[in-house]
Amino acid sequence: MGSCLPKLVLNAQPLEQSICRNYIERSQDQFDNLEKHTQWGIDILEKYIKFVKERTEIEISYAKQLRNLSKKYQPKRNSKEEEEYKYTSCKAFLSTLNEMNDYAGQHEVISENMTSQITVELTRYVQELKQERKSHFHDGRKAQQHIETCWKQLESSKRRFERDCKEADRAQQYFEKMDADINVTKADVEKARQQAQLRHQMAEDSKADYSTTLQKFNHEQHEHYYTQIPSIFQKIQEMEERRIVRIGESMKTYAEVDRQVIPIIGKCLDGIAKAAESIDQKNDSQLVIEAYKSGFEPPGDIEFEDYTQPMKRTISETSLSNSRGDSKTELKFGSKSKGKLWPFIKKNKGAGPEDFSNLPPEQRRKKLQQKVDELNKEIQKEMDQRDAITKMKDVYIKNPQMGDPGSLDHKLTEVGQNIEKLRLEVQKFEAWLTEVEGRLPIRGEHPRRQSGMYEAQNTPSVNNCAQDRESSPDGSYTEEQSQENELKMMATDFDDEFDDEEPLPTIGTCKALYTFEGQNEGTISIAEGEILYVIEEDKGDGWTRIRRNEDEEGYVPTSYVEVYLDKNAKGAMTYI
C-alpha cells in the first residue's frame, strides 16, 4: 500500500489559489472605489441643484425689487403729480416704468421655469439614483460574500484532505515499522495494518470531497468574474453615464430658460426706446403755454413825458385793456409806480376766491370750465341714483313683499334737492364763465367747452354779480361785498354735500339667497350663495349696504340676502 498520491497532493501548492485570493480582495477594493465615485457624482448633482435653487431665489428677489421700484415711481392717483404725466417726456417715463414691470415678470418666469424644469426634476432624479445605486451595490456585496463563502469551503476541504493524507502516511509508516519488528505480536501488526487502511480510506474520501468542492468553486468563480461582477459593473457604469447625461441636459435647459425670455425682454427694451422716441419737445412746450397762458394783451407804448416844460408834468397813462370796448379799464402809473407791468404781476397768496378771480383771464376760464364739468358729472350721478331708486320703487309697488315703496320717498326727495342745488351751482359758475369769455381778447368764434347737458339759466342775482365786477391793476377781479358774502353763504351750504366719506366698519356678514344684477348707480351685483360683509343694515327702506372687498361696495335688496350681524353691533338681528 503506497502513499505517493497523497504526498504529491500535499507537496503541491497551486499558484492559482493565491492569485484567486488576490482577485477576491481586489474585487472588494474595486467596489469600494466605485462606491466612493458614484457618491461623489450624486454630491455633484446635489450641488448643481443647490446652485440652480439659489439662482431662482436671486431672480425672484430681483423681480420683486424691480416691481417695487416701478411702483415707487408710479404717479399717485388724484395728485398733482398725476397731472404732470400729460407731457410726452413724463408719458415716456411712465411707459418705462410699465415696461420695467413687464421686465420683472420675465425674471419671475425664469425662476418658475428653472424651479419646475430643473430643480424639481433633478431632485426627484437624485432620489431615484440613490435607490438604484443602493440596489447595485447590494447585489455586488451579495456576490462578493457568496464567492468568499465558496472560497472558505474550498480552503476547509483542502485542509481536511491535507490532514487525512498526513494521518494516512503516519499510519502506513507505523504499520511498516510494526511489520518489520520480530518482537511484535501478530495481533499488533494486524491492528496497525487495519489502522493504516482506515486512514488511507479517509484520505481517499477527503480527496474526493476536495475535488468536488474545487470543481464547484471554479464554476462559481467563473460565474462571479465573467458574469455577475461584469453585469453589476455594467449597470453601475450605465447608471453613472445617465447621471452625467442628465446633468448635461439640465445645463442645456438652464441656458434655454434664459434664452426663451430674451425676445420678450427685447420687446420691453424696444418699448422703452419707442417711448423715448415719442417725446415731443414742441408738444410739451405748447402744453406749458396753454397751461400758463394769461390772456392779457401786451401793454401799449409808454408816452413821452416832457420834463422841460415848467408846467405840471403830465402823467403818462398806459392802458391794459381788453379787446371789448365796453369793458376797457385804464391802469395809471404815477411817479411812485415801480413799473410792475404784465407779465410781472404778483399772484395773490393763500386760498383763492370761489370764482377764481385771482387768476389771469385764461387760467380763470379753464378753472371755471373744469368746475362746471365736475358739477355736471355730480348731477349725472345723482340722476342715475334717482333713476335707480325710482325703478326699485316700481319693483316694490309690483311686489309689495320685497319692500315698502313709501320707504324710498324721502330718498327721492333728498336726491331731488341735491340735483337742484347742483344745478344752481352750475348756473353760478356758468355765469362767471360767460363773463370771463366776454372779457378775453378777440378769440374768433371759439366754441365754449361746456358739457351741454344743462343750459345755463342766468338768474338776476347772478347777472348783477357779473355786472358789478371791475378789473383791478394786479390782474384780479373784485365784486360788491354784498354779492360776495351771498355767494360765500351759498357755497358754505353745499360744502358738506361733497365731503369724502370715511370707510364704514364691518358690522356682520351676509349670504346671498338669490342672484341680483346691480346695474344702477350705488348698487352692487351678487351671486347666489356668495358670502359678503355688511357695513350698513337696513334702515327701513328695504336696502342693505354690503362690501365685497376694499374697492367694491354698494346696496342690495334686503330680501335677497340673509344677514348675520355681529353680537357687539348695535341692534344686532338676523334678516331672512
Image (cartoon, helix red, strand yellow):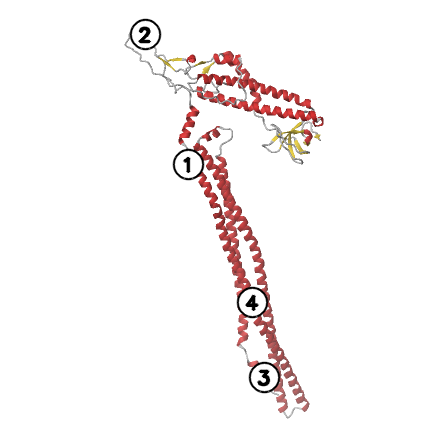
Q: Nearer the viewer, mark 1 or mark 3?
A: 1
Q: Nearer the viewer, mark 2 or mark 3?
A: 2
Give the mark nearer the N terminus: 2 vs 4: 4
Give the mark nearer the N terminus: 2 vs 1: 1
Q: Nearer the viewer, mark 4 or mark 1?
A: 1
Residue under label 2: 312
Helix or strand or loop: what does disc 4 sit on? helix
Query: Residue 307: x and y, percent?
Result: 29, 10
Helix or strand or loop: what does disc 1 sit on? helix
Report, in whole angstroms, how far the alpha carbon at label 2 lies from the one at label 1: 64 Å
Could you tell me if the residues under marks 3 and 4 are in contact, i.e. CB atoms within 8 Å? no
Report, in whole angstroms, how far the alpha carbon at label 1 lies from the one at label 3: 108 Å
Residue under label 1: 277
Image quarter in which the N terminus is found? bottom right
Q: Callout 3: few (<14), some (14-19), or many (20+) C-alpha neighbours within 10 Å?
A: few
Could you tell me if the residues under marks 1 and 3 are in contact, i.e. CB atoms within 8 Å? no
Q: Amino acid at mark 3?
A: Leu
Image quarter in which the C terminus is found? top right
Residue under label 3: 5
Could you tell me if the residues under marks 2 and 1 are in contact, i.e. CB atoms within 8 Å? no
Q: Amino acid at mark 4?
A: Ile
Q: Residue 229 — which label?
A: 4
Could you tell me if the residues under marks 4 and 1 are in contact, i.e. CB atoms within 8 Å? no
With respect to residue 87, does 497 lie above or below?
Answer: above
With respect to residue 16, does 458 lie above or below?
Answer: above
Q: Looking at the image, which residue sits at the far left?
A: 308
Helix or strand or loop: what does disc 2 sit on? loop
